[in-house]
Image (spheres, grey):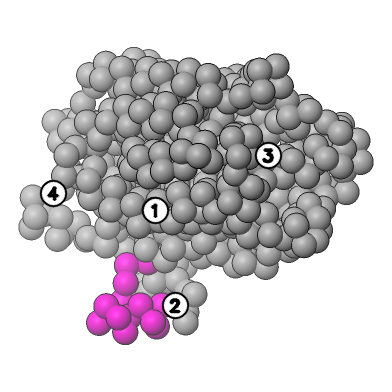
């Protein structure tokens, strides 16, 4: 990270705000963990089915168990991040992921496979996504959409792991591929976790790199205070906005899970080879990498709430188009990509940002965890249902059309949110609001210079 800092300093002509190093480290961690565990899961389905003789629905239950465990763990993980800080949780989570993947690689029975999936889910819930996003919410206020866009560009790059994983499976088999991936995550992901810091204030810095004095000069004192304060969990749960946003995440996120799990099997079913299906997924990820950073500016320009509404409409249209893609109509991917890249990219940039925008950052991880828990039953059921429908009908077309229409319900949920943002509340009631120090304990005698 010091070498990276020197390179960045030369390119920018001066020190870069440390929050951006956290964003870059999180993007790298998400690329590996999300790319192998999440976006490449569909590549494993056919070789596991061929070797073990299990149905697609039975194999998909393993992925759904991860969704169940991640949803069940989300409030607890969020509380632990708020309580002990993101770095400790990320380190522990990555070690659990490593053990779970080795356990998965040795699976001989369906119950062995399911238990390995649960171990991986526990580690994934505690590792990259939750702690890095929580830290970003603390280190940025005005720049949250851009920071989240860059952070989740790493997730987008994870789609490009699919052809790599497919090639490794062809060469070495799916078990050896899991072992290779496990050690890659350990050797690269673990150092990224050590970059994490909870909040900028113990290190003599402030959100967005702007001091309180500079915020005063800009007339932005309320935004600065909003970045270090927030509602309690009980207060958030008493607002209709919390349930509407949770519903939007539920329908939007679970339809994405169905697409992530079954996109490769769908493409293979309509005539694509495993490698060509993997390349189609990689092309999607290649479009998402620059798009997610750019979408942060789109959200700032058009407004975060209108952009959030638009993202669900675009995803719905994209899934309906994807349902009709075949190897003979491969050109339809060129129509699918713009809609789903735009919709999916905006979603990952905004779904956490909106939670912090409406409820503040003081208890962001816990509130986000509760919102994610509502997604759990649907995240478990929908991929399994999609696999069962395919086993009975032999096609995914109807599945993706139904979920394309379902995701548009999320747009309605966001439209119904009438609550002002936390920054607007702070601006109105600033004398009554004090910054939250958080539960994570800062290191003794914090340095006055950015941590290395």
Can residue 131 be seen here? The reply is no
Q: Nearer the viewer, residue 274 or 306?
A: 274
Reply above or below: 169 against 410: below
Comparing 343 with 24, the one in front is 343
Find residue 4 and name its label: 2
> Which comes sooner in the sequence, label 1 or label 2?
2
Please tell me the numbered disc located at residue 121.
3
Image position of 91 (left or right of 170): left
**Looking at the image, which residue is at 27% across and 62% down?**
209
- Determine the secondary structure under disc 4: loop
* Dot 1: element: helix
Give the mark nearest the N terminus, 2 or 3. Answer: 2
Residue 182 within the segment the image draws in magenta: no
The residue labelled by disc 4 is 220
Q: Which quadrant would residue 177 be assigned to in this image?
A: bottom right
Q: Choose top left, top right, bottom left or bottom right for residue 112.
A: top right
């Amino acid at each position: 990270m010091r070498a990276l800092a020197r390179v960045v300093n030369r390119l920018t002509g001066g020190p870069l705000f440390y929050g951006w190093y956290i964003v870059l480290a999180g993007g790298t961690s998400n690329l590996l963990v999300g790319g192998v565990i999440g976006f490449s899961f569909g590549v494993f389905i056919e070789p596991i089915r061929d070797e073990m003789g299990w149905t697609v629905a039975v194999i998909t239950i393993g992925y759904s168990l991860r969704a169940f465990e991640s949803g069940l763990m989300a409030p607890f993980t969020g509380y632990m991040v708020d309580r002990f800080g993101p770095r400790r949780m990320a380190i522990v989570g990555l070690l659990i992921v490593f053990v779970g993947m080795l356990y998965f690689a040795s699976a001989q029975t369906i119950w062995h496979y399911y238990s390995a999936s649960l171990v991986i889910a526990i580690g994934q819930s505690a590792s990259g996504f939750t702690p890095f996003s929580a830290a970003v919410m603390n280190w940025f206020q005005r720049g949250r959409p851009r920071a989240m866009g860059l952070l989740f560009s790493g997730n987008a790059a994870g789609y490009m792991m699919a052809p790599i994983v497919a090639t490794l499976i062809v060469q070495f088999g799916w078990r050896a591929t899991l072992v290779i991936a496990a050690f890659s995550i350990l050797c690269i992901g673990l150092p990224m976790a050590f970059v994490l810091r909870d909040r900028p204030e113990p290190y003599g810095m402030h959100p967005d790199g702007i001091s309180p004095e500079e915020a005063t000069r800009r007339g932005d004192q309320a935004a600065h205070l909003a970045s270090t304060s927030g509602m309690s969990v009980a207060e958030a749960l008493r607002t209709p906005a919390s349930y509407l946003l949770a519903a939007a995440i539920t329908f939007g996120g679970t339809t994405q899970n169905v697409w992530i799990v079954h996109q490769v099997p769908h493409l293979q079913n309509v005539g694509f080879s495993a490698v060509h299906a993997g390349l189609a997924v990689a092309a999607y990820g290649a479009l998402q990498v620059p798009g997610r950073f750019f979408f942060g500016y789109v959200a700032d320009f058009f407004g975060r709430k209108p952009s959030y509404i638009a993202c669900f409409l675009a995803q719905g249209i994209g899934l309906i188009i994807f349902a009709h893609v075949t190897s003979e109509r491969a050109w339809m991917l060129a129509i699918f990509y713009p809609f789903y890249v735009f919709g999916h990219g905006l979603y990952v940039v905004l779904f956490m940002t909106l939670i912090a925008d409406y409820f503040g950052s003081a208890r962001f991880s816990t509130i986000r965890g509760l919102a994610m828990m509502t997604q759990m039953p649907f995240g478990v059921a929908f991929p399994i249902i999609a696999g069962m429908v395919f086993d009975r009908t032999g096609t995914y077309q109807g599945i993706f059309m139904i979920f394309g229409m379902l995701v548009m319900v999320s747009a309605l949920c966001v439209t119904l949110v009438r609550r002002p943002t936390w920054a607007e509340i702070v601006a109105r009631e600033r004398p009554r609001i004090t910054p939250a120090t958080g539960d994570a304990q800062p290191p003794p005698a914090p340095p006055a210079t950015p941590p290395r």
